[in-house]
Image (spheres, helix red, strand yellow):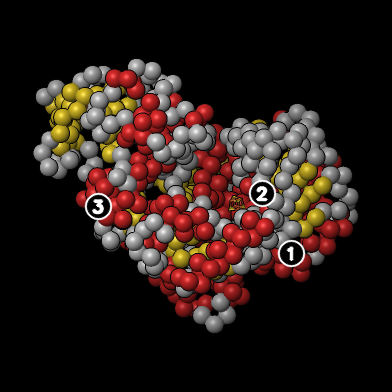
Amino acid sequence: MARTRHRVWKYGDNVNTDVIFPGKYTYTIDRDPAELARHALEDLDPSFAGAVQAGDVIVAGRNWGNGSSREQAVHCLIAAGIHAVIASSFARIYYRNAINGGLLVITCPELAEAAADGAKIEIDMDEAQIHYAGAAYSFPPLPDQVREIVSAGGIIAFLQQNS
Amino acid sequence: MTEKLLARASGNDIVKPGEIVFIEPDVILSHDNTAAIARIFEQLPQGRVKVPDRLAITLDHAAPPPTASHAQNHARVREFVRAQGIMHFFEVGRGICHQVLCEEGIVGPGMTLLGADSHSTHYGWLGAFSAGIGRSEVAALWATGQLWLRVPETMRITLSGRLNPGVTTKDLTIHLIGDLSADGATYMAVEFAGDGVAGLSPDSRAVLTNMMAEMGAKNACMAPDAVTWRWLEKTLGRTRPDNHEDRLATFRQRALCADPGANYASQYQIALDEIEPMISCPHSVDNTQALSEIEATEVDVGFIGTCTNGRLEDIAAAAEIARGRRLSKRLIVIPASSMVLRDAAEAGYIADLIDAGATIGTPGCGPCMGVHSGVLAPGEVCISSANRNFRGRMGEPGAEIYLANPAVVAASCIAGRLIHPAELTG
Ligand code: SF4
């Protein structure tokens, strides 16, 4: 797999699941992608849902996705077309929900520090590197099986397709 | 120590924090939620559980079932257990999953467990790696026997000295969570070490590893020592009269401890004799205060039980306070397992508690999660030996839950307000 090119939406530390996907919708919106996408990051960045494009990535600081275990906080970003979230660190349940739900998550504090909002970056999964402004940033490589789970659309989908 | 446990479970020589590995856990735990997981499992093409001998299932969360729909849920779990030939199944009344799996020697030193329960961190007190995961993940584990994990960084907490009389590991845990906050150990392994560990009783050790879930930890552990082995010999001698020697040999062979000079992401030192009785105030576990500094707080009801503080030592501490006294408030006591209930009855603790006016419930989770056996009314104030005091946890969002050690719970139900047991015993 060659490098893939993405535009950055940049956010800070401790972005919790309430602002990624508002708690007030958790019981009314569950699976409908259009609805999920419409409310993504609503309370963090009202401009996001209208302007995000398929293939964009989120770059954030520490502890992305802390708070409730709601899976919509993963699904709404997939529905919005987000290719990956790259952060300095992730809350534990968010990290698990992301991979098992089919969202690529990459821990890379150096890039999270460097990349600016609106920047263009390139991700090279095979080399486990992100290229930005002429520099390369390494991240811990993901095992093939994890990449397969993500590209299949999550752990249940993966098992449905590969058994 | 966690890295060593995960290296072996994933078939690697060494693993490093941040790395993702696939492990095949020795035990896969679920409880009343088994039926819900089975519905996810049905969407998978496998149809059959790949490793039925590694599944352990207990009926404990709403046991005996309080409503017909809970009863139906249990019936579905039994059906699943029979159809899939699940090896370890424990019926209503045997007790809380975490307590029962330890007593039965299903999990022990050097083993790995993944469970559909957030307090699956529990088993680290035996020197096991154990962590909680989501329901879809458990369904995937049933199908394949393996799951990915991110190797956590380790926080070491070094304990020195001894706890003062009347102070327990519950107070130590509340102190720690208050200090480091509810996300102080997010995604980390917490390892307890130091000469202070040796002085901690087996019943009290699980409180530490169990409640690290309330600090965001992925797992918590301590190396097995003489206390651990004595407890295992005694307990397995009772639950596995025929094969406890074999089981102990397996555990001995698999037991692991931290390397000298191991790397830690952070380190804390705690002098045990500086800890005093602590309270977690509503509505979060890290909202802590020293009992001595708390302002006058009336209580309506007390609860002693749960996987955190429902063991023999806890019931003994409550009986000690209650003996020869009269409760002024309701006190519900629910032993963590049938073994604990039996021992507590034999020791006379149950009689002491009943004579004082307490109610004894069926071994299991009781009202801990707010489904039955003593849930709270709006406005009620509960003093509890459990591990969580979130708003609505015991049934009603308008109720307030304070967490403390079992002796404080019993004393407070006698006085009708939060007090230090020494106020009664002089
Ligand atoms: S006793 Fe409470 S915390 Fe422990 S397993 Fe049961 S419901 Fe969970």
Earlier-in-chain disc, 2 versus 1: 1
Question: What numbered label is drawn on residue B371?
Answer: 2
Residue occupying image coordinates x 71% and y 30%? B293
The residue where tag 3 is placed is A145
The reply to whether label 3 and label 1 mark residues of one chain is no
Instruction: Check mark 1 vs ligand 1: CB closer than 8 Å? yes or no.
Output: no
- In the image, farthest residue toward the bottom: B242
Residue at disc 3, secondary structure:
helix
In the depicted view, which residue is nearer to us: B160 or B347? B347
Residue B84 in the image, given as x and y percentages of width and height? 45, 70
- Location of residue A10 in the rendering, given as x and y in whole percent from the top left corner: 30, 22
**Total marks in image:** 3
Q: Is mark 2 within 8 Å of ligand 1?
A: no
Is label 2 in a helix, a strand or a loop?
A: loop
Give the class, few, some or many, for how many residues have Cα within 10 Å of label 1's Cα (few <14, many ≥20). many
Left/right of residue B238 with respect to residue B143 in the rendered view: right
Crowd band around label 2 with a 10 angstrom C-alpha radius: few (<14), some (14–19), many (20+)? many
The C terminus of chain B: image quadrant? top right
- Who is closer to the viewer here, B236 or A133? A133
Task: Name the kind of residue labelled 1 in the image.
Answer: Ala
Label 3, label 1: how far apart the Cα atoms are = 49 Å
In front here: B11 or B252?
A: B11
